[in-house]
Amino acid sequence: MDAAIGKVFDSVSDFFSGAASASADEFPLCDSDIISGCEKELAEAQDEGRKKECMMRLSWALVHSKMPGDIQRGIAMLEALVVNDTSAMKLREKLYLLALGYYRSGDFSRSRDCIQRCLEVEPEWGQAQTLKKAIEDRIVKDGVIGVGIAVTAVGLVAGIAAAILRR
């Protein structure tokens, strides 16, 4: 358990330092043991500064979870944390995690909005640029699929109409 939590701390540290460079489809995932460890750490935190650190680790773990419910919890936690932030560096991190949470939950429009805000704070942040590209690629892919479905539906209706008119 301690080794698993240590891996999360290393991943979070790499993330915040910019050392992590996962491709758009290879975001690290967390399991329930790691999330439980982060929750325990938050419950045991005494001072406000430590609680904020623990909340960031927990929100990171939640948006990287395999479970959709955990991702939604992480999004809710981050939405509350973004409102109260005055530090540009911490705001960028929270906006990135919020964008990632929305991306992983399939809400690409909100994800794009958050990553745009993140890039306004830190335009040269490579991880945010990578996520932005993944979001845009996914929106384009979903748009092409949507157009394909619409064209197929129109073709099907036209075919049925033509068959009826021939009788």
Image: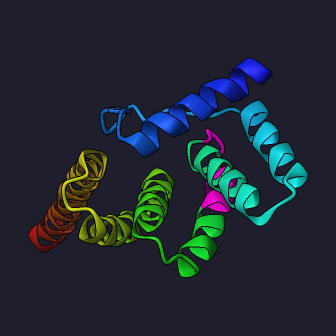
> Residue 25 appears at what percent x and percent y?
35, 35
Question: Does 27 appear above or below 44?
Answer: above
Question: Does 132 appear above or below 166?
Answer: above
The answer to whether 113 appears left or right of 145 in the picture is right
Identity of the residue drawn at 47% across and 60% down: 102
> Residue 159 appears at what percent x and percent y?
15, 62
76 or 86, nearer to the observer: 86
Can residue 68 be seen in the rendering of this structure? Answer: no
Q: Main secondary structure of the magenta part?
A: helix
> Residue 112 appears at what percent x and percent y?
31, 66
- Quadrant of the drawing holding the C terminus: bottom left
The residue range painted magenta reads 65-74
Can residue 96 be seen in the rendering of this structure? Answer: yes
- Quadrant of the drawing holding the N terminus: top right
Residue 139 figure quarter: bottom left
Question: Does 35 appear above or below 55?
Answer: above
The answer to whether 138 appears left or right of 49 in the picture is left
Residue 73 in magenta stretch: yes
Identity of the residue drawn at 66% across and 44% down: 67
155 or 47, nearer to the observer: 47
Residue 49 figure quarter: bottom right
Residue 13 in magenta stretch: no
Residue 127 figure quarter: top left
* Total numbered circles: 0
Identity of the residue drawn at 49% across and 78% down: 86
Identity of the residue drawn at 87% across and 57% down: 46
